[in-house]
Amino acid sequence: MPAPTITLNDGNVMPQLGLGVWQSPPDITAEVVRTAIAAGYRSIDTAAIYRNEAAVGEGVRASGVAREELFVTTKLWNDEQGYDAALRGFEASLKRLGMDYVDLYLIHWPAPGQGRYLETWRALLRLREDGRARSVGVSNFMPEHLRRIVGETGEAPALNQVELHPRFQQTDLRAEHASLGVATESWSPLGQGTLLEDPAVRQVAEKHGKTAAQAIIRWHLDQGLIVIPKSVNETRIRANFEVFDFALDEDDLRAFAGLDSPTGRIGPDPVSFG
Ligand code: A2P
């Protein structure tokens, strides 16, 4: 069964479930990507800083699935912020991927200390105009960063990819996204694996005859989030895609709601990072 899709604010359509390849070693990533596409995934999320864009491109080409049926995301690293630097960074990514366009290009972090995310955003808008990036968006932006780029350019990002999992549900940020028409994409959706032993999650999973990872991925889908769990293991890659044959009920949602914590962040704080 194909993944459900989300229609972005630019009219483009994106699979709601994709494969994340952060921490997927470059030497095995081509095979990981090929395996995921064979399992039904049509969306792959990489970044310049992951050092595996070339392998992603290789895996896509080895999959035998037409490029236009796939949705490829990559991201601009912090040291390439600025208008001209971003255009150059994009070309380098495209070259490594061996592609003539990406479906989605993101500013990886706002890096507010650098003070360049607005001009970087203008460069991404130019790439969208040129058709080299079909959609453009941001990652790890906080409400103040979003409001600034929208206020200055009148253009809202297609999505904001942020750390989001049951222990860090980002409720306020999601409300801001809803008011701006920005989709939300969850990185580290499984809490980098740390949530898989949580007793409340396990209880929900067992009730449905599913694994903890499947229950969490289902939770993201039910919240309307775009989700990109990472795995390099074929069995887990396949299992993470077997989430379209069950639904969470009110009790399950209450159990998940109870996991949210103000100290649940695992990754860097966007205010000070980059
Ligand atoms: P592996 O790649 O060996 O499968 P997140 O997407 O939240 O960052 O979580 C990724 C982590 O969770 C990785 O360590 C990954 O390891 C692990 N993982 C992914 N899917 C599963 C699964 N179905 N069961 C157990 N661990 C998983």
Image (spheres, grey):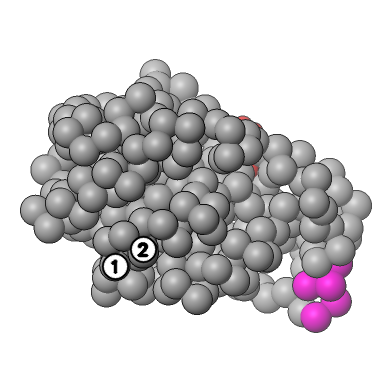
Q: Quadrant of ligand 1?
A: top right
- Picture residue at 72% right of the left edge, 52% below the top: 168
Q: Residue 267 location in percent, x, y?
A: 64, 36
**Crowding near the residue tagged with mark 2, few <14, some 14–19, many ≥20 C-alpha atoms within 10 Å:** some
Specify whether 136 is left or right of 226. left
Circle 2 SS class: helix
User: What label sits on residue 51 in the rendered view?
Assistant: none
Q: Residue 209 location in percent, x, y?
A: 77, 63
Task: Single out the residue that lies furthest toward the left.
Answer: 130
What residue is shown with label 1? 154
Depth order, front residue of 181/233: 181
Specify whether 260 is left or right of 227. right
Check contact, mark 1 vs mark 2: CB within 8 A. Answer: yes
The magenta stretch spans residue 251: yes
What residue is shown with label 2? 150
Q: Is mark 2 within 8 Å of ligand 1?
A: no
Circle 1 SS class: loop
- Picture residue at 84% right of the left edge, 72% below the top: 254
Asked whether residue 48 is in view, the answer is no
What range of the chain is rendered magenta? 250-255
Depth order, front residue of 108/46: 108
| Disc 1 to disc 2, C-alpha distance | 5 Å
Depth order, front residue of 96/56: 96
